[in-house]
Each structure stands twice: as structure tokens, then as C-alpha cells.
Image (cartoon, rainbow, N blue to C red):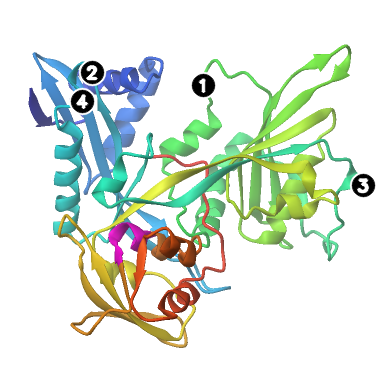
Amino acid sequence: MEITQIDPRDNQLFGDWLRAMARTILQSPMSAEQTASRTARRITRGAGGRTFAAMDAGRVVGTFESFDADAATVVAPGAPGTAVQTHNISGITVAPTHRRRGLLNQWITAELRWAHERRVPLAALVASEAAIYGRYGFAPVVESVRWSVTTVTPAGLRPPERPCESGEGCISDVDDDKLRTAGPGVYDQARLQQPGAAPRDAYAWDEIRHPEADDRRPRWTFGHRDAQGTLDGYARVAVNQAWHDRAPANTVDVLDLSAVDARAIACLWRACLGIDLVVTVDAYDRPVGDPVAELLRDRRAAQQVARNDLYWWRILDVPAALTGRWWAGPGALVLDVVDPMGLAGGRWRLDVDANGQADVTPTTVSPDVTMGVDALARILAGQGSLTALAAAGWIDEHHPGAVLTLDRLAWAPSPAHATYTWF
């Protein structure tokens, strides 16, 4: 078996690579159009990306790819969004005939070291199996929720606190061409306010506009506009048609909902929940803190029917990662970071000023807390209770109150967001 780096412009070999990946993850074979689109996507990812194949007797038996991107980080309330560079790992498959031969371990460790040498602060991935990547220092930092809302009449919605002004908050249909041109700007502005949210490339937007050929469900997009008439939010929906004994049993899937502020999100939710002849509205890849339940007089009508991890981070450069987010300062702590791979371990003093800006410097003084790089990734994203992590053994406290201080500093004003964006 031989590991080789391949060029996506090699149509034959990269086509074999795509077919091998699809087969192993139980997907249908890609069409010629899908193959061409995926090839173009890989080529345009440019610097910081690599594609590897494991070859055995001329056959692709393992796949791996990576590329540089970024992820939104925690920002101060009302402040412009920021992002930190990430090295995204994707397309990891090993054929059933070649498992347990160390391919995954070889690829992951080499890729993390390569990204670390290039001084990339974070590695990121979407894990197909949750038990695999913790051994390499990855931790789940963003959860994905599927919300399901039973039929809500207009009377079942709480009235808005402030009615929309003339021209503001107007909900209208947005055609696919308009979504393709204006949607990326709305999404980018919105996602930089939401920790963990990943960027979308043109390939992802084209997928939204052109669904799979066998998906013929009716679908459309609601648009929300600000007082100047500019699109500042959208909700893409699809209808699952069903009638039982001449009574409507249709359901709606909210495929993608994004907006630049909370008020626009609420207006778009109201539009989705107000579609006639529908018994259930389901929304996928929504944040844990989605406001949908708070829009209802009967909040029990909205249920989190599934909640799972989606994005996983692995810190490669502690100072670069921790200074890339806003902190609820002021405050100071000494962090002892353990990294079995020797990439990001060390003892660091975290000094946060009154503006929430951090300074991270090496130190030899005794630590306030000790943790692995996996726990530090959770802290970086500002998600979850650190006292719960400490109780579970992720964090060791050496001075009373240190975990509470770190929990306060790491607070995030916006919930982590898992969008309809995979890589």
C-alpha cells in the first residue's frame, strides 16, 4: 500500500478518489456534473490544501483532504465579527478491506504537524464518529440541533415587542438568483457574530440553489429586509407533501436560516411558522440557543428532537488562538496546557484587560488550572459550563475559585452556531 498526494486536476485519479470516498461513506456514486463541481471546488481551495490517496494495486483504498479556512470566534456584544484561521480536515475514509492498518493515525498526525509548522492556530473537522478524534486533541465545540415545532396558529405566536416600522422587517419571497447573489453577504455578516460558524464557498451556495436531482420537493426562500430595503436575512424552506383523508399533513423543513440580527431571525421564524396547511415545521443545524421556543405562547410546541456535536476544534497555537477571541474581562489566570503530541502544550499566563482583549505569554509560575488542549478548545469557543467540565475531569483546579474565574472570562454573548455548512 502506498500513500500518494494527488492533483485534483488529474481527472482520472481524482475521479477514482471521489468514487472511493463516496462508496466508503455509503453515498450514491457521483454524477459527472457532481464530479466536475467537486473537482473545481478542490482546485479553487488553493494554498494550504492537500489531497492524499492510499493506493493498493492501482486502486484507491483510502482518501484524505485538507484546506485552510477560518472559523468565527467570540466577539463583544455589538462589535464587528472576527475569525481565526483554521486548517480543515475532511474526506477521511478507509475502505473496509484496509482498516486497522494505521492509515488514519498516519494522516491525522502528519497533517496536524504540518499545520502547526505553518503556524495555523486551529485544526477543524466534522466527525462522522464521535469516539475517534479525541485521542488527537480534538474536542466538540459547536452543537447542532434539530428543532421541531407543531402547528402554530397566528394566535399562538407572541406578538413582537416593537412593531416593524414602515419598510422595515418586510418579508417577501426571494428567487434563487437573488439568494445566490445577496445570500453570501448576509451569511458572512451573520456568521461572524456566531462562534464556530464556518465560511461557505461557491460550491456550497450552488448546492443550495441546485438540490439533488431526485429531490423534487417544492421549495422557496423568505427574505427579510431592513428599513432601507436591503436584504439582511433569509430562510430557505422545503415542503414534504402529505394529505390524510383529505386533511393536510404537510410538513416544512427549514433548510437554512440566517440573518444579521436577532430581530430579523424572529421575523423569519414567524414566516416559516405561518405557512398554511402545515402540521409540523422542522429546522436542521440550528443553534442550541435558537429563539424559536420563545416566540410561542406555548413553548412546548417547540422541541429539540435531536442534539449532536458538529464542529470539532484542535488548538495548535495557544497564544494565537486565545488572543483571537473576546473575553469577558478583566482578569488573569495561569493555564497549564497538556498536549500529548507536543504541539501546543505549555504553561501560559492569560491576562485580559477591561476591553476583553487578551495577552498570552509563557510563564513558569504555578498554574491556577491544568487542562488538555481538548478542554482549551471548548473554552476558546465559549460554549458550555466549565464547572461541568471540571466535574467531569477535563479541568484540574489548583486554587479555589480558579474555574469560576475562567468560566466568567470565557462567557460568550452569542451561542455557538452550527449552520447548514459542512466541509
Residue 376 among those drawn in magenta? yes
At label 2, the amino acid type is Asp
Q: Earlier in the sequence, mark 4 or mark 2?
A: 2
| Residue drawn at point x = 83 percent, y = 14 percent | 244
Mark 1 surroundings: few (<14), some (14-19) or many (≥20) residues within 10 A: few
**Circle nearer the viewer, 2 or 3:** 3
Judge by depth and name the residue closer to the eye, 325 or 289: 289
Q: Quadrant of the N terminus?
A: top left
At label 3, the amino acid type is Ala
Q: Which residue is mark 1?
A: 212
Tell me the quarter of the picture where residue 324 sits: bottom left
Residue 80 among those drawn in magenta? no
Tell me the quarter of the picture where residue 180 sits: top right
Specify the segment rendered in magenta.
371-377
Q: CA distance from mark 4 to mark 2?
A: 11 Å
Q: Earlier in the sequence, mark 1 or mark 2?
A: 2
Q: Which residue is mark 2?
A: 16
- For numbered disc 3, what is the local secondary structure? helix
| Residue drawn at point x = 36 percent, y = 81 percent | 399
